[in-house]
Image (cartoon, grey):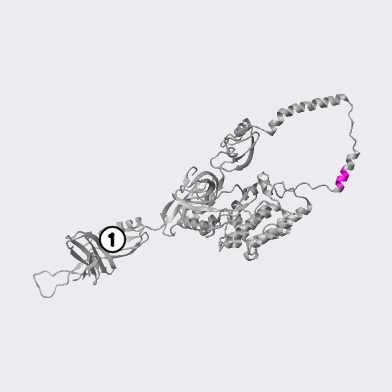
């Protein structure tokens, strides 16, 4: 995607993030000459029309929100089957990464972030929009400490796909509310519960509920109470602790009535913390904000300076200074040595200090893909320092090789600057979960959430399973595989209708074998005497030849048991020279008729012949013939009341009994 232009306006620059549902890129808006963020829906969801339509509708709804603590959505569109959202580009980091780096946070920072999230939720709830996926990953913090909540449209669209149905618990299960884990209706109170989870994690450094699987965490969300916050933070403000516990109530009715109420509680805590800090110590207005501290940048705000000495302390210091008499140095040799040392230091300082204070600029080399030892050597030669920021799993980069670097290659930095790198731990091996029994949509979402990609799918007919259900998968459940592998699914499909062959005149046993190969069961079968068909041959079938049938459709047959045995009556007492005609013991139930149809001159017309007999009404002939042609067709009917009808061009042409 990098380098492509969407809607003749948004030029993709670089990838800045990804998630289970979408990829995020920075882009240049050529119309307004500004940098924006573009979120692209993943390809496996772009084929789901229901998901895409809900995604568009909810994204447009989220675009109606306008608040300082909500990421602004500028545009929603589609081009070449790529669905995208254009939004405000936020210069900062997400709360998830900050928690991983710093663990616990100061109370002032927690209150400030929590208040801004609650203000964003209050604005959204007022406009009838529930986020449904509040988590640290969706909370961005700028370098100035401003909170920006994002992903309103994505969260809404995900909820519409019923991701918590049929025993499945997908998505951000660590931040789900109990009602989301149960798969019931989600209201504004669910967002407040998720906010409580985020606050708990900021206070303690970890979420309240953790487990080996999504199901186990979901059960904890429904049943368990979190560990008391005082265990991790004995100094925690009492009202802040009460607020978090109230937000984490299992019953939505026991949580705060609204996000606005949460904002008011945060404001009250904020004023009390500020007043307490002011009473204890003076504030240096030039010190950085807590948020700025996290980014390693300057600013002004809440960090504390040292306490000013009291009058008594200043007087005591003066008395101590008076007691110290200056020591006199009388030895000239010592004085001379000191002068020489100071002179040497001064000369060295003239040459060394400028190099320390004003190092030269160097260009950052490209170390991505190099082994750690090689990367350290390359950086050392460039007068730069090497620092491992994180070890991560990677399916493409070998173990102990550099996955990414910050600053990027080609940037100009000062000598001795630290280059932070992420190092590969190699491919992550996991146990393959089971997707058997899920619908195709559920399986696609589940395998994506589990870190896999969709492989080649195939469909087979299974008469015992409704269409669209996963029958088999490869790799099989329980196998140890590399995370990110392709998963191929075998799905059940609906039976496809096909034309029934003509078995009349064929051997009955052969016909039964053909039925089995076509997936058609044998229905009823009757033996009858026939002077036309030899023993074991099919006389008639139901449905008629050419009828569209599906797998599993039963087929009835009448087959011949040969000609009936003749019986000659005993001779009469009157003698005669002529032999008596033999009489048949069997009454023939079948009638044969030769039908002749003359098509009127002119355009071609369709001829249809129906037989109404003991089998019911069935179509035995349907063809289109040119005008002026003649059609001759031999048909059979079973029973004394058997009739046939002929339709020409859609109108009944003939209706007659076989016996006429």
Q: Which residue lies furthest to the front in this view?
A: 32
The residue at which mark 1 appears reads as 545
Q: Which residue lies furthest to the left in this view?
A: 577
**Quadrant in which residue 510 is drawn:** bottom left
Residue nearest the viewer, comparing 121 with 348: 348
Please provide percent x and percent y for residue 330: 89, 27
Residue 610 in view in this figure: yes
Instruction: Find numbered disc 1 in the image and state the secondary structure of the residue it sits on.
Output: loop
**Quadrant in which residue 352 is drawn:** top right
**Residue 316 among those drawn in magenta:** yes
Residue nearest the viewer, comparing 513 with 45: 45
| Quarter placement of the C terminus | bottom left
> Which range is magenta?
312-317
Residue drawn at x 12%, y 75% as measured from the top left = 573
Residue nearest the viewer, comparing 9 with 596: 9
Q: Residue furthest bottom?
A: 573
Please provide percent x and percent y for residue 644: 23, 68
Q: In this view, does 471 lie to the left or right of 401?
A: left
Q: Is the magenta stretch mostly helix, strand or loop?
A: helix
**Quadrant in which residue 642 is drawn:** bottom left
Please provide percent x and percent y for residue 611: 25, 67
Crowd rating for badge 1 (residues with CA inside 10 Å; few <14, some 14–19, many 20+) = some
Q: In this view, does 461 lie to the left or right of 484?
A: left
**Residue 561 among those drawn in magenta:** no
Would you place residue 230 above or below residue 389 in this image? below
Count the labels in the image: 1
Residue nearest the viewer, comparing 304 with 204: 304
Residue 379 in view in this figure: no
Please provide percent x and percent y for residue 563: 22, 64
């Amino acid at each position: 995607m990098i380098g492509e232009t969407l809607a003749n306006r948004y030029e993709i620059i670089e990838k800045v993030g990804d998630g289970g549902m979408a990829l995020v890129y920075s882009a240049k808006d050529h119309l307004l000459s500004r940098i924006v963020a573009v979120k692209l829906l993943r390809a496996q969801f772009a084929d789901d029309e229901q998901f895409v339509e809900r995604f568009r509708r909810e994204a447009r709804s989220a675009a109606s929100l306008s608040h300082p603590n909500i990421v602004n959505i500028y545009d929603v569109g589609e081009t070449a089957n790529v669905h995208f959202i254009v939004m405000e580009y936020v210069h900062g980091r997400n709360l998830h990464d900050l928690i991983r780096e710093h663990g616990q946070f100061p109370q002032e920072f927690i209150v400030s972030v929590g208040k801004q999230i609650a203000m964003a939720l209050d604005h959204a709830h007022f406009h009838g929009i529930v986020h449904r996926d509040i988590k640290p990953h969706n909370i961005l913090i700028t370098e100035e400490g401003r909170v920006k909540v994002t992903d309103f449209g994505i969260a809404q669209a995900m909820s519409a796909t019923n991701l918590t149905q049929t025993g499945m618990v997908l998505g951000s299960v660590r931040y789900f509310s109990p009602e989301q884990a149960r798969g019931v209706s989600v209201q504004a109170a669910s967002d407040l519960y998720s906010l409580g989870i985020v606050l708990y994690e900021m206070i303690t450094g970890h979420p309240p509920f953790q487990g080996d699987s999504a199901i186990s965490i979901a059960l904890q969300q429904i049943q368990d109470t979190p560990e008391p916050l005082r265990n991790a933070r004995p100094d925690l403000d009492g009202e802040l602790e009460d607020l978090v516990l109230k937000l984490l109530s299992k019953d939505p009715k026991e949580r705060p009535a609204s996000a606005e109420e949460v904002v008011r509680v945060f404001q009250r805590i904020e004023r009390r913390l500020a007043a307490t800090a002011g009473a204890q110590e003076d504030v240096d207005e030039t010190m950085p904000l807590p948020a700025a501290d996290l980014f390693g940048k300057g600013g002004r705000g809440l960090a504390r300076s040292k306490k000013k000495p009291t009058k008594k302390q200043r007087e005591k210091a003066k008395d101590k200074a008076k007691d110290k008499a200056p020591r006199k140095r009388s030895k000239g040799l010592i004085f001379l040595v000191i002068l020489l040392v100071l002179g040497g230091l001064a000369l060295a300082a003239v040459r060394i200090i400028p190099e320390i204070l004003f190092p030269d600029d160097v260009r950052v080399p490209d170390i991505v893909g190099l082994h750690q030892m090689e990367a350290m050597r390359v950086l050392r030669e460039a007068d730069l320092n090497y620092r491992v920021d994180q070890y991560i799993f990677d399916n493409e980069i070998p173990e102990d090789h550099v996955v990414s670097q910050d600053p990027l290659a080609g940037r100009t930095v000062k000598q001795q600057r630290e280059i932070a790198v992420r190092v590969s731990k190699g491919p992550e091996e996991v146990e393959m979960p089971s997707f058997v029994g899920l619908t195709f949509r559920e399986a696609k979402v589940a395998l994506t959430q589990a870190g896999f990609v969709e492989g080649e799918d195939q469909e087979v007919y299974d008469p015992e399973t409704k269409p669209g259900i996963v029958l088999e998968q490869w790799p099989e459940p329980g196998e140890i595989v590399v995370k990110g592998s392709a998963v191929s699914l075998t799905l059940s499909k609906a039976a496809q209708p096909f034309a029934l062959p003509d078995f009349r005149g064929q051997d009955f046993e052969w016909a039964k074998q053909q039925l089995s190969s076509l997936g058609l069961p044998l229905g009823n079968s009757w033996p009858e005497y026939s002077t036309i068909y030899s023993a074991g041959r099919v006389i008639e079938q139901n449905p008629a030849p050419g009828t569209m049938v599906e797998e599993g459709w039963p087929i009835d047959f009448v087959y011949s048991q040969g000609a009936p045995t003749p019986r000659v009556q005993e001779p009469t007492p009157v003698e005669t020279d002529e032999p008596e005609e033999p009489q048949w013991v069997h009454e023939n139930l079948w009638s044969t008729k030769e039908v002749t149809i003359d098509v009127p001159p002119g355009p071609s017309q369709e001829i249809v012949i129906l037989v109404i007999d003991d089998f019911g009404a069935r179509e035995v002939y349907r063809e289109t013939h040119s005008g002026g042609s003649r059609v001759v067709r031999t048909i059979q009917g079973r029973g004394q009341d058997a009739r046939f009808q002929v339709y020409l061009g859609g109108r009944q042409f003939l209706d007659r009994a076989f016996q006429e």
